[in-house]
Amino acid sequence: MAGFLKVLFRNVLEGPSTDPFPLGATFTPDRLRGRARINPELCMGCGICHNSCVAGAINITHLPDGSGYTITIWQNSCCLCASCRHYCPTGAMSITSDWHSAHPDTDKYDRLEQHTIKYEPCAGCGTLMRPIPAALAKRLYAATPHLDPEKIRHLCPDCRRQEDAKRNAGIVTATTTETVAAREIVSAAPTKY
Amino acid sequence: MSLDTTLKKLSVRSPWLFRINAGSCNGCDVELATTACIPRYDVERFGCRYCGSPRHADVVLITGPVTTRVRDRVLRVWEEIPDPKVTVAVGICPISGGVFREGYSIEGPLDRFLPVDVNVPGCPPRPQAILEAVVLARSIWLKKLGFE
């Protein structure tokens, strides 16, 4: 009897424990996985997300004229496992806490996260390529302060290789045969942390 | 005729829910049980309650990709629900096949076989998202009845 009264008084004082949700606000944890997002500034179109997506929700299509690509996530197939976020090398994938997913069947194929990303011409040879995102280039070339990441990120892989060869040739001619060890350290310097 | 309309107006606030497991992994079924059994979510605030017979139901919640073994049984049970009924696909599996799509024993997605009205994607969807879907299904149900 006394235990029942205790529960009754507690309930009267504390109010109902029901979440008032559709009629009022509810609590959303910050890290809740609700909806996958792509940052078009950072996406390189490498396809890691497409290959790691267990639900086959991500598709990357090249534009027919070769001027770019379209990356698409179909939210109705995404199982929110966050594999894409985990494996994305540039950090372009993120998952927001927007969980309001109920929709009528007419909107079934409209729930897309879609971005068309255009290629830019290489600063060296002019072939169309996707420049390395500025933040990533800064991170990649952090160990080599004599390289300008802003300049190098607009070069295609071939031109980067040529630039690197020229630089190494410069080092070889500048340093004579006595400093072989120093040369080896330069070529083996890690570029990624 | 007038008795019929009176009865309809009386029953209009209480759509009863029925749950069909079409080969689900039980994740979505646990979330559906959560909406009914945990006082925090409490789907009975909207007059909805889970019923044991398809003949009593108004809103049917289907979970799981439709597997070969369960397909005909799902369709038979779905046919037993009286019209007007609202079909809700819960989770990504009945909507698109999800992670099981193109499997050898998967016949889905669900809308190949029956008309779906509301989708709630998620793996599984949050209980609050299921509540949103039930509220949406209720408004569609009222429209089908001609009350809204």
Image (tube, coloured by chain):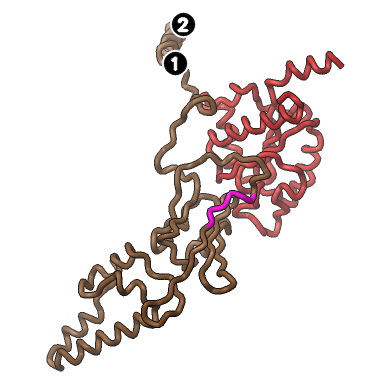
Which residue is labeled 2 in the image?
A1
Chain of the residue under the numbered disc 2 shown in the image = A
Position of residue A2 measured from the top left corner of the image (x, y, whole percent): 43, 6
Which residue is labeled 1 in the image?
A15
Secondary structure under tag 1 reads loop
Quadrant (top left/top right/bottom left/bottom right) for the N terminus of chain B: top right
Left/right placement of residue B129 relative to residue A92 reads right
Seen in the picture, residue B79 relative to B11 is either above or below; the reply is below
Question: What range of the chain is rendered magenta?
Answer: A109-114
**Which residue extends farthest left?**
A178
The shade of chain A is brown
Give residue A176's quadrant in the image.
Answer: bottom left
Left/right placement of residue B130 relative to residue A15 reads right
Position of residue A111 measured from the top left corner of the image (x, y, whole percent): 58, 49
- Residue plotted at (56% across, 62% down): A59
Q: Which chain is red?
A: B
Q: Nearer the viewer, residue B17 or A126?
A: A126
Seen in the picture, residue B57 relative to A3 is either above or below; the reply is below
Quadrant (top left/top right/bottom left/bottom right) for the C terminus of chain B: top right
**Is residue B11 inside the magenta stretch?**
no
Position of residue A60 measured from the top left corner of the image (x, y, whole percent): 55, 65
Disc 2/disc 1 C-alpha distance (Å): 21 Å
Seen in the picture, residue B146 relative to A175 is either above or below; the reply is above
